[in-house]
Image (cartoon, rainbow, N blue to C red):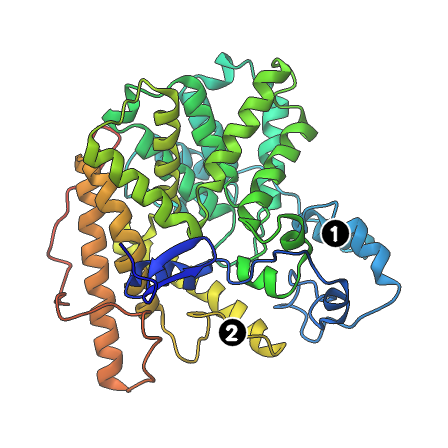
Amino acid sequence: MYSPATSQRRGAISYDSSDQTALYIRMLGDVRVRSQVGFEPERRISHPYLSIDFRTLHTRPGYGSTSATSTPERRVHRLLSFQRYLHSSRLLRGVPQQIPLHMLDEDYTGQARCMLEKVGNWNFDIFLFDKLTNGNSLITLTVHLLNQYGLVELFQLDMVKLWRFLVMVQEDYHSDNPYHNAVHAADVTQAMYCYMREPMLAKSLTSCDLLLGILAAATHDLDHPGVNQPFLIKTDHHLATLYRNTSVLENHHWKSAVGLFRETGLFSHLPAEDSLNMERELGSLILATDISRQNDYLCRFRRHLDQENLCLSNASHRHFILQMALKCADICNPCRPWELSKQWSEKVTEEFFQQGDIEKKHSLEVSPLYDRAINTVGNIQIGFMTYVAEPLFAEWTRFSDTRLSQTMLGHMGLNKASWVGLQQEQTAVEPSPAPAEVAGAPTDSVTAGDTSSKEIPQGSKDS
C-alpha cells in the first residue's frame, strides 16, 4: 500500500517514488503531458517547431522556415505516411527513386536461403541477412515464415497482394532511422518466431494466432518517425492531437498497418467480420508494445504466474501471451549475443541522441537519457537491462523455462557485465560527468571481466 506522501502519478504509471523501475520506464518514453480539456490552437501556430519536417532534420540543417503557402501542403502530407511523403517529394523534385527490390546475385540468394534454414536459431544475424537480401530482410523473412507455417495457403492469401503489402510495409519504415527501421522489424519478427516455437506456445497457438503474431511483429513500428511520444506531445504534433497523447506512436503503427491491409486488399476475400476482428486483434498486440504500459502488463503476467491460472486453451489467455511474446521480442536486443546486442545498443542510443540534438537546437527541454553530453551507450544500456529487460525476461522464464530462455538470460548477464567493464575502463582513462541518477545500475554486484571464455547454450529451432 502506497502512502499519499510517497505515491506519485506520471502519465499512465502510478508508482512509489522509490520504484526506480517505473521511473526508468517513464524516462524512456512515458506520457509527461496529458491534455484534459483539449488543445490550444494558438500554441500549435506559435510553436517554432511546428513547421519543421523532422524527417529531414539530420540531412538538411536550417530547414524549418515557416511559409504561408506550405499550410495546404502539410494538410495533404498528413494523409500519407512520412516515408511515402518523402518518396513523393523526391519525384516532384525530379530526383530518381531507388527501386526497392533488385535482382539478387545467385550466390547471395543461396546464402540467404541457407540462413533461412536456421531462422529459428537465437544467434540469427539479421544484419548479415539484410545484406544478403539486398536490404529486403523484412519482406524475405516474413514471406518465408508465412509459407513455412502454411498460412498463405490456409488463409488463401493472394501472393501478389501479399508481396505488395510487404513491400509497402518495408518502404514505410524509415531507412534513415538508426534504430526504428525495417531491419529492427525483421529482427523482432525473427524473435517472435523463436518464441512461438517454444513448447508452451507451439502446442497451443492456432493458425490465426500465428498469422497475427507474425504480422504484428512485422508492422509493430510501422512509419516510426524516429522520435518518442513526449517529443510529439511537447511539439503539438498532429499525431499527438489525433490520439489525445495516449499511445500515440503505437496507435499510429496500428492504423498505418490497417491502412495497408485495406489499400492492398490483403484480407478483402475474408468475411467482413473476420477481417475487422483481425484488425482489432492486431491493434491489441501492437498497443501492448507501449513502454509506458510496461508495468501494467508485467504485473498482470506475474499475477497469472503466481496464481498458476494461465490456460492456453482459452483464447484471451493465448492472446495475452502473444502480447507478452511481442513485448519480449521488441526489447530482446540485450538478450542477443554480444556482437549483435552491441550493434543494436549503439543504434538505439544514437537515435536517442539525435532527438536530444534536435531538442537542443530548437530550445526544447531535452528528454532524459537523450543528452549525449551527459549519457553514454553503456550507462543507458545498464539502466535499461536493470529496470526494463531483466524484470520482463525473468517472468518470461517463469512462464517458459526452456533452453532458449536460459540462453537469453545468460547473454543478458554477460552483456551487462561487458557494459559495466567498458564503463569502468572509460572512467579510468578519462573521467566523465556523472550520468543521470537512474540511468545507471549498481555495479558492485556485477564483476566485469573477460567474457569470451564463458559459454552459453544456444537456443535453436529444436530447443
Secondary structure category for the residue under label 1: loop
Residue 222 rendering spot, x and y as whole percentages: 56, 44
Residue 72 rendering spot, x and y as whole percentages: 86, 55
Q: Residue at x 63, y 76 (%)?
A: 362
Residue 60 rendering spot, x and y as whole percentages: 68, 70
State the mark number for residue 376.
none
Residue nearer the viewer, 184 or 439: 439
Q: In which quadrant of the rendered view does residue 430 lie?
A: bottom left
Residue 205 rendering spot, x and y as whole percentages: 35, 21
The amino acid type, in three-letter code, at marker 2 is Val
Q: Are marks 2 and 1 in contact (CB under 8 Å)?
A: no
Judged from this view, the residue extending furthest toward the front is 4
Residue marked by disc 2:
366
Q: Residues within 10 Å of mark 2 (few under 14, many from 20)?
A: some
- The quarter of the rendered structure image containing the C terminus is top left
Is residue 372 something one can see in this rendering?
Answer: yes
Q: Residue at x 49, y 31 (%)?
A: 215
Q: Is residue 234 left or right of residue 120?
A: right
User: Sequence order check: which comes first, mark 2 or mark 1?
Assistant: 1
Q: Residue at x 32, y 74 (%)?
A: 437
When the figure is inspected, residue 342 is found, relative to residue 431, above or below; the finding is: above
Q: Residues within 10 Å of mark 1 (few under 14, many from 20)?
A: few
Secondary structure category for the residue under label 2: loop
Single out the mark in the foreground, 2 or 1. Answer: 2
Q: Residue at x 26, y 45 (%)?
A: 393
Is residue 343 something one can see in this rendering?
Answer: no
Residue nearer the viewer, 112 or 184: 184
The amino acid type, in three-letter code, at marker 1 is Pro
- The quarter of the rendered structure image containing the N terminus is bottom left
Residue marked by disc 1:
96
Q: CA distance from mark 2 to mark 1?
A: 37 Å
